[in-house]
Amino acid sequence: MNRQTTISRRTVLTASAAVVAAGLVPPRAWAQTAPIKLGTLTPLTGAGGSYGPSMRKAMEFVAQEVNGAGGVLGRQIQLVSEDDQTSPEAAVRAARKLIDVDRVVAIMGTWASAVTTAVAPLCWESKTFLTTVSGSDTITQLPHQGYLIRTQPNTNLQIGKLGEFLISLKVKRVFVLAAQTPFALPSQKRLTELLPKGGGEVVGAVIYDKDKTTFRSEIDQALRAKPDMIYLNGYTPDSTVLMKELYKASYTGAKVAQGYAVNQKLLDSMPAEVSDGTYTASPSPAVESAGYKRLAKFLGASDLDPYSCQCHDHISLVALAIARAKGEANGTTVRDTVRKISQGPGTKVDSAVEGLKLLAQGKEVNFEGASGPCDFTEIGDILDCQIRFEQAKGGKFTFVKMI
Amino acid sequence: MVGEIAQLVVNGLVAGTVLAVPAIGFTAIYAVLRFPNFTVASHATIGAFAGYVVNTAFGWSAGVSVLVAFLVAGAAGVVNDHVVLRPLRPAGALTTAIGAVALTIVLENIVRFIFGNDLRGYALPLQRDWQWGPLRIGPQQVENLVIAVIAMTAVFLFLASTRTGKAMRAVADDPTLANLKGIDPERVARLTNFGAMGLAGIGGMLLGLDTSIDPLTGFRVILSVFAAAVVGGLGSIPGAVVGALTIGVAEELSLLSLAPAYRSAVGFVAILLVLTLRPRGLLGERAY
């Protein structure tokens, strides 16, 4: 018995030494030919489930194009895709797999702010680059050491423009109904500061649990404040319920919501009279850009959501940064070079393939993608973004204005 | 203030009545098969989608669609139990409960595979609420209330006055004795599963009628269903009704002093309080 244990321990030791050796040596030898692994972590299911699949497809599109044109520094891009389930717990499990098992250079496409907040520490600790479409202010304030950029305007920028819009509508009494999210309180605070400048005020606010099936009591609370505008700051499932319940309660005032929550799918799921008049605010993709048009053609849609456009830009930025760095492909090189290809005096390019060609010729590039100019501040926020305001009429959106 | 409390109680009673339907299903399975069957969540979703299909594709009314929800979810319940959970039962209640959690995730994803993630609404006219002084109540809520009460009355009549119903109660009280008396436990298990998952299906559809449905419809309420069953006494059918009404009203009344974001905590607090002070639940665990 004793003897057997000794043998098996020795065997185990030899075997593990062999495994470690095999694991250590070859990657160095193959580094210049092995594919570059990039991770996508999008909400394929859960509250963000209507966006995730198309976000992933947008990234697959760029990977295909780049690989078709010869890859990055001669290496193919290999996408490893995981589902974050719009849940921080599931996202952390998926991110661990991407980082520890697949050893990806970057994780791209996290959507919900709660998910990004949970995944970000894993990324900066493992020196994996993270690109996200989450809007909460707190995200870029994390101690991420530069391993994070986002293409979604932060709450401060978005609510600033929303406030400007509400003031232009001359509303006086705004009530905020917000889902429990990291951006609920900051947006409420910012709006409370802004509205008095235009003679309005926030007359009350409720932060609700979005997983409840009925919100009648929350609606009662809102109506008691007699608002002339209700700001619905939640996600699609809860906004659907809230809008129907506001209709049933015979609320006649105006409504405004984020475009990712009140979208065409939501309008299709309810009679037009319920949604009529609702304003929406969405960070606008660069609809006139060539990048947008190519992506729209590939996805077979005329109207793209901003997240798919942003994801198209995420993978393009990462690919260009790796190519610009020329050396090893890892999170740190992406961090150190991403701003050298996203902004600055280089030639403007709207596709990764075009940018890679110029970089190979030793020229500098400035990537402007399907979502917008993609210029970043030191902490990873985008510098500016247009917000598109629309209004639901007869079950369709009509354009109101850009701010 | 009085008006506000009255409104909260009305909202709570309506929510509680709808919650009671799947809670009866959950507790009935516990009474007969002795394990917490969390697939109530996915069967509620299956029922909601079955009702949705006949409602939107064939234009059937809510009342008839609910019947379809019952039949489809019930049939799915029998098949799923036979194929997946029955073989696990000899390994103990904990193993079966874990199997049920896994199965519910699989079933939810099958629904997602077929219907996608998008929200769907039933093809029903949205009606404005009725207003009586400070009280507001919706026609759809009243219809839900009526459907839920009819379903519950049917369950009670079935258990009290039919031979099969009595057989079920006998198995719940003492499986060995019931077996000695010649009651086939397998047959009772199948019937219980059919009825219980059918009720879950009705519950899922009633939840969706007032709001909208997606593959997570059942999953969102499973905590409240579980809390209702535990508070009323796991295994007690009248207990599930009392428990559901208690949870429904308590969740609403909590809004008087708590922010709505903490509403889900009410279910957990109720479970903690009941397990600490009265582990058998409000009505004990007698099945009926």
Image (cartoon, rainbow, N blue to C red):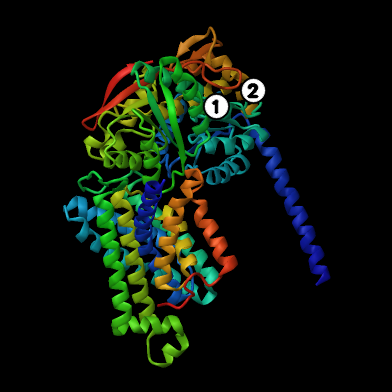
Q: Chain of mark 1?
A: A
Q: Amino acid at mark 2?
A: Gly
Above-or-below relation of B193 to A260? below
Which residue of the protein is positioned furthest toward the top in this rendering?
A: A345
Residue A197 is labelled as none
Q: Quadrant of the C terminus of chain B?
A: bottom left
Number of marks in picture: 2
Instruction: Please state the horizontal and vertical placement of residue B40, each as a whole percent of the image.
Output: 40, 63
Q: Is residue B76 visible?
A: no
Instruction: Specify which label sits upstream in the sequence, 1 or 2.
Output: 1
User: What residue does disc 1 label?
Assistant: A137
Instruction: Please state the horizontal and vertical placement of residue A291, each as a whole percent of the image.
Output: 39, 20
- Judge if badges 1 and 2 mark residues of a common chain: yes
Which residue of the protein is positioned furthest toward the front in this rendering?
A: B2
Q: Amino acid at mark 1?
A: Asp
Cα distance between the residues tagged 1 and 2: 33 Å
Identify the secondary structure beneath mark 1: helix
Q: Residue at x 41, y 59 (%)?
A: B41
A176 or A85, nearer to the observer: A176
Q: Quadrant of the N terminus of chain B?
A: top left
Q: Chain of mark 2?
A: A
In the figure, is residue B60 to the left or right of A80? Answer: left
Q: Quadrant of residue A267?
A: top left
Instruction: Please state the horizontal and vertical placement of residue A226, each as a whole percent of the image.
Output: 35, 32
User: What residue does disc 2 label?
Assistant: A327
Q: Residue at x 25, y 49 (%)?
A: B122
A68 or B153, nearer to the observer: B153
A307 or A243, nearer to the observer: A243
Q: Residue at x 44, y 20 (%)?
A: A195
Above-or-below relation of B165 to B123? below
B4 or A286, nearer to the observer: B4
